[in-house]
Amino acid sequence: MGSADMKKETVYTLFSKIPTLETARLTLRGMKVSDAEDMFDYAHRPQVTEYLLWMPHADIAHTKEYLTYIGQRYRTGDFFDWAVVCRENRRMIGTCGFSSFDYQSDSAEIGYVLNPDFGGRGLATEAVRQVLDFGFGQLSLHRIEARFIQGNDSSRRLMERVGMTFEGWARESMKVKGAYRTIGTCAILRDEYEAQVKEPE
């Protein structure tokens, strides 16, 4: 078994009992079927999914089916996304986590979505910082990247706010909902993250 295989096994073992993470205002935990109402509240809105790969949820039954499916994937350890819960009202207000890993290169891609009713308070930034900290600290990653569809300026601003560097565009590189979309990439390396953490704010 090579080192990359060992790392994959470690990640799958870790996420089969997805750890709970805490920030100043948020709890990041595994998603539950009981989150369906909170998830549907944002997942059915076309403006939320405009720059995402998935379509708006048609009804709450779809959301419940999706969360049931996610529960099965958690059990096998091959799903790496947390529910983002606002502790002040105990509502699930979005998701944040890893969408994929490149085990050979010690790198990962992260993704996130937030209920727009909770925007403008720095909550998505807080969640992403916690996931970066987990990736570099617990998973010993070397690089973490995030991608966004051209036009999603707020997502790019969030990436740059947490210290990521914009690396460029891949022109019409992804077919999303029937259209070829240009994809931007931002990334941060471990030493950049560690230097940022040590700096006084």
Image (spheres, helix red, strand yellow):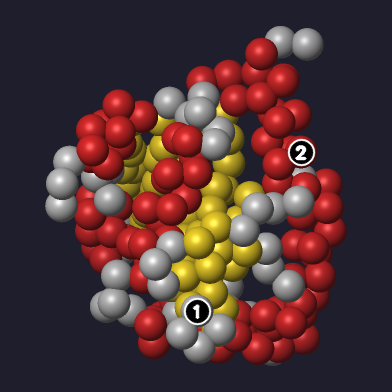
Q: Looking at the image, is mark 2 or mark 1 earlier in the sequence?
A: 2
Of marks 2 and 1, the one in the foreground: 1
Name the one closer to the observer, 171 or 136: 136
Q: Residue 176 at x, y = what percent? A: 50, 58
For label 1, the SS is: loop
The amino acid on which the numbered mark 1 sits, given as a three-letter code, is: Arg
**Image vertical order of residue 176 relative to residue 54, above or below:** above
Which residue does the image show at 39% across and 87% down from the upper left?
117
Q: Residue at x 68, y 68 (%)?
A: 31
Residue 191 lies, in percent from the top left, at 30, 26
Describe the element under mark 2 as helix, strand or loop: helix
181 left or right of 43? left
Residue 81, x across and y down, in percent: 60, 56
Q: Is residue 11 left or right of residue 55?
A: right
Does residue 106 appear left or right of residue 35 in this picture? left
Q: How many numbered circles are shown?
A: 2
For label 2, the crowd category at 10 Å Cα-Cα, with few meaning under 14, some 14 to 19 and many 20 or more, is: some
* Res. 58 in view: no
C-alpha span from label 2 to label 1: 27 Å
Task: Residue 134: tell me if it is visible.
Answer: yes
Q: What residue sits 28% from the left and 51% below the top?
A: 162
The residue that disc 2 covers is 13
- Residue found 40% across the figure and 40% down from its top: 145
